[in-house]
Amino acid sequence: METPAQNRPLPRVASDLVQDPSLTLGPIVMHPWFSPILKSGEYITLLSTDQIGYVLISGTAKSIGINTRSAFKSDTPSAIIRWDASSDSITLILTTLLQPHRFLQSQSHSHLRPQPSESESVRTDTNPNSNPKFSSTAISLLKLLPEALAVSQTYKIPKFFLKFTSLLLQLHASPLILYTAYALARDTPNCKRYSSETLTEAHLGCIPKPLRRILQTHCPRYLIALDELHLKWVEAYEELQYCFTKNLKVNIKLEGYGSICKKRFGRGCPAYISTNHSFTRLRQIAGEAALTVIKSNAYRFMCAEIEEAIHEATRCETCAHRLINAFDAVMRHVMSDLRTTIAL
């Protein structure tokens, strides 16, 4: 036998939010963020499938796209509109549109969902080479987005997704989070835009498990496309490192110090001295310095920032120019045909 609505355990969202017994009206529990404090005028109660009610002034409801025309009967100032949607989805939609500050406050997401478990939390210390600015609030909200998107489309609330992505930006969401949000909306142009921002070392190959699960469950082709793009860039970075330090694979000779650098100041240039006359060691030092800049910015071609890093690493103008010319040729060979966005 089905448990009466008033005796059913509330879903996590509602049970976390309902603190005041006075907010209960029969089998309906009024959401405290949208509770009946109106003194006059028309208003609606938006009701979820799990019996959570949201009170909105009629004009406010209309302003966000809720159809109230058929809800009011005769001269009654109030009406109930039932949505085939959970309180999770309605809370996310209404709060994003009308009270986004609640999600921007410190720890505000704990009122919407329990904190992610340690296994699901995004840890930036597991990879010493990465430090992406993931927001636990953004990821918590993103987990609720698939159903909320479907609800907003069913009930024609077009402003929701635009406001949601704006909220993610205010939460300093990473490009991977934004990519996932646009993938759920099947917005390929914006997915391409943000996929290009995930090619730095901080994000490359670092898709958090919660995001990977969301993509795999709801839009797997976008996950496959991003994984393929990341793999090509990882391979390109590895080839760059090999070419910079071992084998250039281009028609340029880069073997040993030049005679001028060996004799400069009677002792040799600063690079010659600091590497104990080892040009192989100098290539390794300069190559690592160049790669650090390249990976941090996803550069495909030589630029002033890379040149500056090589100059600082070698401390010799002549040696730096030789290495810059060689590394420039290598980058053109390895990176010029590399895609910078997903292939969809």
Image: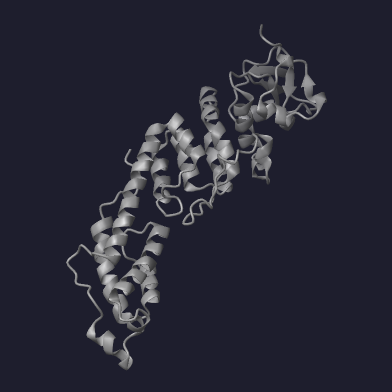
| Left or right placement of residue 37 versus residue 335 in this view | right
Q: Is residue 307 visible?
A: no
Position of residue 260 relative to residue 37, above or below, is below
Q: Nearer the viewer, residue 327 or 303?
A: 327
| Left or right placement of residue 177 versus residue 136 in this view | left
Q: Position of residue 192 (x, y in %)?
A: 38, 43
Q: Quadrant of the N terminus?
A: top right
Q: Nearer the viewer, residue 338 or 238?
A: 238
Residue projecting furthest to the left: 251
Position of residue 324 relative to residue 79, above or below, is below
Q: Nearer the viewer, residue 294 or 83?
A: 294
Q: Position of residue 215 (x, y in %)?
A: 45, 34
| Left or right placement of residue 176 versus residue 26 in this view | left
- Specify the quadrant of the image occupied by residue 50: top right
Q: Nearer the viewer, residue 315 or 14?
A: 315
Q: Quadrant of the C terminus?
A: top left
Q: Is residue 255 visible?
A: yes
Q: Residue at x 26, y 80 (%)?
A: 257
Q: Residue at x 53, y 53 (%)?
A: 125
- Specify the quadrant of the image occupied by residue 89: top right
Q: How is the image coloured?
A: one colour
Q: Position of residue 2 (x, y in %)?
A: 66, 9
Q: Residue at x 44, y 36 (%)?
A: 183
Position of residue 255 relative to residue 16, above or below, is below
Count of marks placed on residues: 0
- Specify the quadrant of the image occupied by residue 92: top right
